[in-house]
């Protein structure tokens, strides 16, 4: 899933440069969560975004971590 919040729709960057920050907050048990932001060169936050990803394995040789059970029989691939 994706979410994008536009904080300053008319923002300009005085010198044409933009800062994009991307941070993987969590990567575990087949899921990843990432936060992103874009800032103008004069320090104005313009856009905030989030992404959540699930990775599924079709490889039947991948085993679930000990103590975990996946009802589908198709375990999540542990990143």
Image: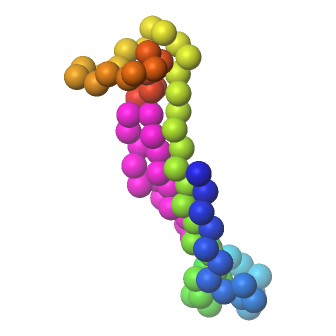
Relative to 24, 9 lies left or right = right
Question: Nearest the camera: 1 or 39?
Answer: 1
Q: Residue furthest front?
A: 71
Q: Residue at x 39, y 21 (%)?
A: 71
- Is 22 magenta? The answer is yes
x and y percent of residue 35 in the render?
50, 61
x and y percent of residue 77 in the render?
45, 26
- Is 29 magenta? The answer is yes
Q: How is the image coloured?
A: rainbow
The C terminus: image quadrant: top left
x and y percent of residue 58 in the render?
56, 17
x and y percent of residue 36 in the render?
55, 64
Q: Residue at x 71, y 78 (%)?
A: 17
| Residue 22 in sight in this render | no
Q: Residue at x 41, y 55 (%)?
A: 25
Relative to 21, 6 lies left or right = right
Q: Residue furthest left?
A: 67
Query: For the image shown, how many numbered marks are present on the structure?
Result: 0
When the figure is inspected, residue 22 is found, relative to residue 62, above or below; the finding is: below
Q: Residue furthest top?
A: 61
Q: Which residues are magenta?
A: 19-37
Provide the major secondary structure of the magenta segment.
strand
Q: Residue at x 57, y 87 (%)?
A: 43
| Residue 49 in sight in this render | yes
Relative to 79, 55 lies left or right = right
């Amino acid at each position: 899933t994706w979410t994008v919040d536009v904080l300053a729709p008319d923002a300009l960057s005085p010198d044409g440069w933009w800062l994009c920050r991307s941070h993987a907050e969590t990567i575990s048990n087949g899921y990843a969560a990432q936060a992103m932001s874009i800032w103008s060169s004069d320090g104005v936050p313009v856009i905030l975004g989030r992404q959540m990803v699930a990775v599924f394995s079709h490889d039947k040789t991948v085993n679930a971590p000990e103590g975990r059970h996946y009802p589908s029989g198709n375990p999540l691939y542990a990143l």
